[in-house]
Amino acid sequence: MQADWPILSLVIWLPIIGGVAVLASGDKAPEISKKTALAFALLTFLLSIPLWTGFDSGTAEMQFVEHAAWIPSFDVYYHLGIDGISMPLILLTTFLTIFVIVAGWEVIQFKPSQYMAAFLIMEGVMIGVFCALDAILFYVFWEAMLIPMFIVIGVWGGPNRVYATIKFFLFTFFGSVFMLVALIYMYFQADSFSILAFHDLKLGMTEQILIFIAFLLAFAVKVPMWPVHTWLPDAHVEAPTGGSVILAAIMLKIGGYGFLRFSLPITPDASATLDWMIIAMSLIAVVYIGFVALVQQDMKKLIAYSSIAHMGIVTLGFFIVFTILSQSDTASGGVLGVEGGMVQMVSHGFISGALFLCVGVLYDRLHSRQIADYGGVVHTMPVFAGLMVFFAMANAGLPGTSGFVGEFMVILASFRADFWYAVLAGTTLILGAAYTLWMVKRVVFGEVRHEGVAKLQDVNGREFFVLGSLAVAVLALGIWPAPLVEVMESTIENLVQHVAVSKL
């Protein structure tokens, strides 16, 4: 379906132009640059709403398609389009960017215009990743995403920020090189860089396995999956609050999106052969990283490890498809697993973003992330304490919150695949409750032990707006996930049918 007007281009390029405009306004008038940044973020979100309202959920075809020549001599085109997988993730990006800009409003005193501009440019580039249907265009956006994040952590980060940025960059860049090689190889096979042409490309088993591993190296680092997860806690601890929110809420999802857009449809046979490896990595992430989160002293580190464990549920939901398909004639179990993974991605975007913002609120007041430096916050900040406990419950997967829906769907699908998969996946709810509530008990409840805590001020209007809006989103998705599931239904059914057919 061709778009009547280039709405995807607008949603990609408007925040990037906004970022350049904010940079140009400079730090001489920081209030103007902040207001400009917020105006562009709001406008981008409003422009992205027609993607939802005008979306036809009855078809698996690409919608709002744009196609223009870019480098015709190499068959590279400016080709954009969205389906039921990419559209919710674009809306998540445009929605959360508003809060990131509002959250940094008073806190960022050093070069605020550059800070705001980095997030706007990053927003445009990440939406570009979700929309790109040309492999080279995808790769350009994919690599461009690293630059603003690198700057955000490197300039506004903590004391070890240089180490964290270089580690983050090297890890992610290393994986991407292999992906580029795989994309160029497929170009020579298909005579096109179109991702949809790659989906239909006939490939032998050896080719598929090599391409699958190349994609795995790129996407596993991004998710991050165990054992290539070590860059994430470091990056989170050093990143400013806004950086942590974007990193946890959107950047990690791009890895999950890559599996659905590339690994599964392009190499279905290799995915089916190597699914045991991904399932093993996912279950190790759920169980082992859950225990690692239990012993953390730093709140940000704990939430970072929690993100790795929750993303383990996502990748498990995506790859149990093959086990389910081999055991039953219907694809419904596989569809449930992938849908559960997608719901978990969107839900985790809200919850992890909110938890990092909660830590940011405390850090702005006491300049400490150590759990031991708090205790009894409920006595001095009752409104904040209520919101933080709510997000902690959502992180632990409380029914009625969005955290429960995705996890429940994946665990339900896991039963169709293997009983023990479901048992191990189910531990996420227990471990999630253990480390999250253990943190809340020590930070929020108990006696006031430190004089700094006794002097704390409750959330102001700005902070309440940010956390309250996310609480509404978590609750709405938890009580009524149907709108989200419906838009993805056709696309995911089509994907599961596609991967069920061998290319050999």
Image (cartoon, rainbow, N blue to C red):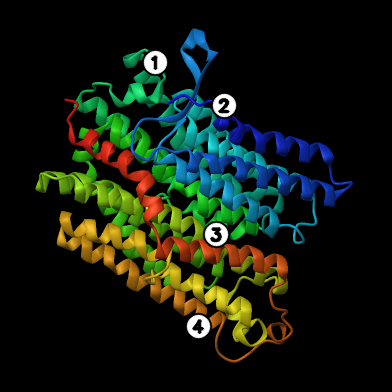
Nearest to the observer: residue 371 or residue 43:
43
The local crowd at label 4, few if under 14, some if 14 to 19, many if 20 or more residues have their Cα within 10 Å, is some
In this picture, residue 427 sits left or right of residue 448? left
> Of helix, strand and loop, which one carries label 4?
helix
Measure the C-alpha gap from mark 1 to mark 4: 56 Å
Q: Amino acid at mark 1?
A: Ser
To which residue does mark 3 refer? 353
Which residue does the image show at 52% across and 46% down from the upper left?
91
| Mark 1 or mark 4, whichever is nearer to me | 1
Nearest to the observer: residue 94 or residue 377:
94
Q: Amino acid at mark 4?
A: Lys
Q: Amino acid at mark 3?
A: Gly
Residue 441: mark:
4
Which residue does the image show at 62% across and 53% down from the upper left?
243
> Of helix, strand and loop, which one carries label 2?
loop
Pointers 1 and 4 in contact (C-beta within 8 Å)? no
Which quadrant holds residue 446? bottom right
To which residue does mark 1 refer? 192
The local crowd at label 3, few if under 14, some if 14 to 19, many if 20 or more residues have their Cα within 10 Å, is many
Q: Position of residue 39 (x, y in %)?
A: 72, 46
| Mark 2 or mark 4, whichever is nearer to me | 2
The local crowd at label 1, few if under 14, some if 14 to 19, many if 20 or more residues have their Cα within 10 Å, is some
The answer to whether residue 160 is seen in the rendering is no
Pointers 1 and 2 in contact (C-beta within 8 Å)? no
Q: Position of residue 194 (x, y in %)?
A: 40, 21
Measure the C-alpha gap from mark 3 to mark 1: 38 Å
Measure the C-alpha gap from mark 3 to mark 4: 20 Å
Measure the C-alpha gap from mark 1 to mark 2: 25 Å
Measure the C-alpha gap from mark 2 to mark 4: 52 Å
